[in-house]
Amino acid sequence: MEVTYTDHGIFVSQERYLLNLLKKFDMENCREASTPLEVTHKLSKYDGADYKDMRKYQSLVGSLIYATLTRPDLSYVVGVLSQFMHCPKDPHWILGQRVLRYIKGTIKEGLYYPFTSDLKLRAYSDSDWAGNQDDRRSTHGYMIYIGDKLVSWCSKKQHIVALSSTKAKYKGLVVAAKELIWMQTLFKSLGIDQGTPTIHGDNMSSLYLAANPVFHARTKHIEIEYHFLREKVMEKEIEVEYISTKDQLADIMTKSLDGVKTNRFKSMTGVKEKKMI
């Protein structure tokens, strides 16, 4: 990991590591890709012939997981690839090569942390619905900021099938809330009071469910553990707030985006080229 100090902030990147990664898989001279994943991808563990070298595939995915330490824009596609570690097919390896081609074109990018005094905690939470082709499970993701600095992010497939988009989004909010509470506790132990953290979501039904103390019949199937978010909201330990889908930064954690949206969200999350800071 490479850390560069500027007059206005800190730039964290892994350019040397990514370059060695390209060389390791003989992709240093490959053509570049504008996005890590096609918008209309439909990967399945049943499609295509078995990839002949499982260890090579597993090595690639493991290496890409480490790359996500400074490249949150890779988190979703790496999560997709990791679902096939035990049974890689040819299309999965082709996607892995596409990710390397995307890295080739963005190898100088990393996370930029400007020097600012704002310490308020805020999070963006989102989920797709039944996006997995094999088991119809959803993927949730969150991005947590201290001021305008991205400090924690996650993209993960949910453990159970969500019966509605509201349930998938609500569970995503809960996961983000757990991380926020942990971070808030950490800051309190350091004597720093940050006020009430805010979670931004783009689904009105899930936000209403979190803020409304009335138990609706249509939510009886949601496990009790997930309703602790409602308790935290009622106790004013966490706020939930609606945000337009076009400004939902966590979109990059839950789905594949086109080139325009990818670049826009990367800029908003703090992923920049070194020469642009």
Image: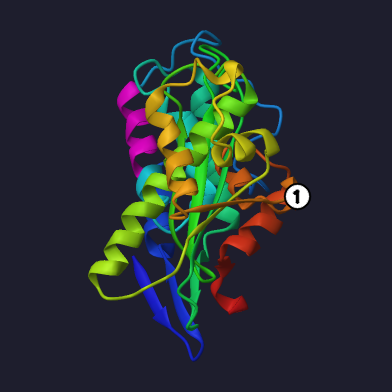
Quadrant in which residue 219 is drawn: top right
**Above or below: residue 87 compared with residue 4:** above
Q: Taking the image as drawn, is residue 50 in sight?
A: yes
Q: Quadrant of the C terminus?
A: bottom right
**Above or below: residue 80 compared with residue 31:** above
Q: Residue at x 41, y 41 (%)?
A: 25
Nearer the observer, 172 or 254: 172
Q: Amino acid at mark 1?
A: Lys
Going by the image, does 60 lie left or right of 47? left
**Per the image, is 193 magenta?**
no
Badge 1 element: helix
Q: Residue beneath label 1, please?
A: 246
Q: Position of residue 115 (x, y in %)?
A: 48, 83
Q: Position of residue 6 (x, y in %)?
A: 47, 87
Residue interval drawn in magenta: 54-63
Going by the image, does 198 lie left or right of 244? left
Residue that sits furthest to the left in the current view? 189
Neighbor class of circle 1 (other Cα within 10 Å; few <14, some 14-19, many 20+) is: few
**Above or below: residue 106 compared with residue 45:** below
**Above or below: residue 97 compared with residue 265:** above
Residue that sits furthest to the front in the current view? 214
Going by the image, does 209 lie left or right of 53? right
Q: Position of residue 21 (x, y in %)?
A: 39, 49
**Per the image, is 58 magenta?**
yes
